[in-house]
Amino acid sequence: MTVGSVETRTDFAPFEARLGDGILSRDRMVGMPVFRIKREAIADALRFLRDEPGLRFNMLTDLTVVDCIGLHDGDRFDAVYLLHSLERRERVALKCPVPEEDPFIDSATPLFKNADWLEREAYDQYGVVFRGHPNLKRILNHKEFVGHPLRKDYDIYKGQWLSEADDLLDELEIRHRLDPKPRSSDRETMTLNMGPSHPASHGTLRNLVELEGETVLYAIPEIGYLHRGFEKSAETHEYNQVVPYTDRLNYCSALINNVAYVKAVEELCGIEITERCKYIRVIITELSRIMDHLVCNAANLVDIGALTNYWYLFNLREKIYNVLESLTGARLTNSYARVGGLWADTHPEFEDGVKMLLKETPKHVNDTLKLVARNRIFLDRTVGVGAIGTEEAISYGFTGPCLRATGYEYDLRKELPYDGYDRFEFDVPSGHQGDVYDRVMVRFAEIFESCRIVEQALAQMPAGPVNVEHPSIIIPSKKETHGSIEGLVNHFKIVMHGVDVPKGDGYAGIEAANGELGFYIVSDGEMKPYKCKVRAPCFQIYSAYPRLVEGGMVADAVAVLGSLNVIAGELDR
Amino acid sequence: MTDQKGKGSGAGADRVATGRFTTDEIPPESVMLTRLDAALNWARKNSLWPLPFGTACCAIEFMGMVSSVFDLSRFGAEVVRFSPRQSDLLIVAGTVTYKQAPILRRIYEQMAEPKWVISMGVCASSGGFYDNYCTLQGIDKVIPVDYYVAGCPPRPEAVLQALVEIQNRIVANPAPR
């Protein structure tokens, strides 16, 4: 059967039989089939979908809430669960209506480990209470915040001051109670704040750690220091105006965010972009992936004391900056993609620039690898540190290099190919035990694979237009605008009303540098997104941080943090 | 020191006297007369120790500024310190939220005088295009700022210009703050 743009091969009959009356209706969204179910049935439904052999939806891709006050007259909130079966390459969504006067639903934390932070975020932003959650506390907004900002009746400009940072001792108390750890009786423990202003805190991460000697007993991460309201801002801007906001999600690879966002909007509109556009997007995506891995590995190596690599890797990054700047006009925050195409076609020198990069990249990376790959100190600091197994990683929602480092070769470019990735030959590097060493090396190996893809894409790039021909999506050329009445009308319409996106919702995810970057967009047919939820890869990966560092040394906590590539912009949004 | 005081010809020259020599005995080519505050300011100017309060995208451009292409060390300011006690130039690089504001304030207060602040990028300067419920609309609501740099993010050259401007102000300052 076909649902939206995705054909689903899954037989949901056992699921429907199991839930019976629990299913309110069958629905569809772009990208996957949807079941509307009663909220009482949610735990059972999730468990069945996860464990039933023919279904095996083993990853909770995202969990969010939609405030339906402007969409229909039914219950105010919809809790939305996006599930992904990694082995069968299928997705499904569950929606549960939740009334405003009694906004609770059962927690999914016993089933999926990443539900912990996802539910805290949904509670923080919408005020939906997840029953049975061990620590349902605000996560993005501060402790003195009143109200729930993503509810439609919360004024976007209403800022609230915080008088003093949270001491986090209440969370430590909960951990002591739920997860008591044996400790030697003669040694006192020490609680210590790492961050938010700390050389290894990568921007704005904070951890309260309880140490016994140098061993980390408990780590309590606090995030939200860079929560700058992406979603609320997106709801007040036209679709194309959201593109600059996406730059600043993962600012180490802004172009990938651009592409991921416009791809979600395009799928919602049902537009197929042009062939040339696909190739250019592949090239800029892969160059951005290289840049992202450079920053991540450079910073990770600096954090564990290897400074020279930083100079080597950042020099290459500067060279990529120059090429992208000549293409987009900006070094870092490019805002290059548009719904239905790109801001502009490439220029003749762009190809030469990319060819130069293809020559330079392996040189710089090999120089670095000579310094680290067999370096005794590097190996001592990374091998076996912060290791995690595949199954647990999936439960935490790991994707991208962090999942592949555990030995599971899962890459959306191979599994659910988009933008013509199935035409390119490349390998998916993977590790063995999911430790810091594997994560660093997987990233280095991916840089070489990205070079292979760019090389092929450059050789095969067809001529032709970069933008779709669609008067309600793409602004007409100057010639048409000034030369014909239709052109003028279309120009006026797009400038005044923005891109025409039909009513509905949909999810699209692509393989970003960090993992699966997806956008779940709800459109009410107006000029602005009704809701725009980012599935940020590092949000879920970082929720596993305590699991990775507890029991290890405090210095290893720094090495682990760098290897997860946590970018505060997309972590906190 | 005290018993050498009457020996020189004038009170000003006396102050130059060291414990062992009077001004008459020091070879003239090895002496440069200046004011104490000018000497201190000269030293401060050329050895600013920045604390990068990097929160967002601007922090990545800060990394670019430190790396070898733009090379912050040309201006004597490459000793990046994350301890406020050891630094005298606070570079706020990135968006500061209401949640972050008390921490920024505390870090500024922990820095010893004299100290200077560069607000790098529009988010730090005015909130930028994050005009919403969680973003502080400019760090000057919680700490004083010496120099604002426009850009989202600013190019490294723009921040270097801010640094040079701070250096000029340090020299022009008659007395250390």
Image: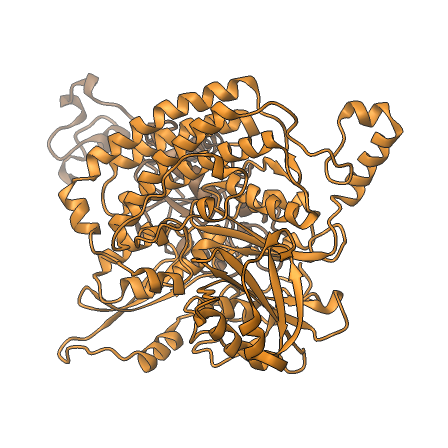
The image quadrant where one finds the N terminus of chain A is bottom right
Q: How many marks?
A: 0
The residue positioned 32% from the left and 42% from the top of the image is A297
**Residue A151 or B3: which is nearer the viewer?**
A151
User: Could you say which chain is coloured brown in the image?
Assistant: B
Quarter of the image for residue B104 reads: bottom left
Please identify the residue farthest to the left as the structure is shown.
Answer: B20
Residue B128 in the image, given as x and y percentages of width and height? 60, 46
Placement of A301 over or under A275, stated as above or below: below
Residue A498 in the image, given as x and y percentages of width and height? 75, 44
Q: Colour of chain A?
A: orange
Residue A109 in the image, given as x and y percentages of width and height? 44, 74
**Residue B169 or A477: which is nearer the viewer?**
A477
**Residue A220 or B38: which is nearer the viewer?**
A220
Left or right for A354, reference A80: left
**Residue A363 or B159: which is nearer the viewer?**
A363
**Is residue B124 at all visible to an observer of this figure?**
yes
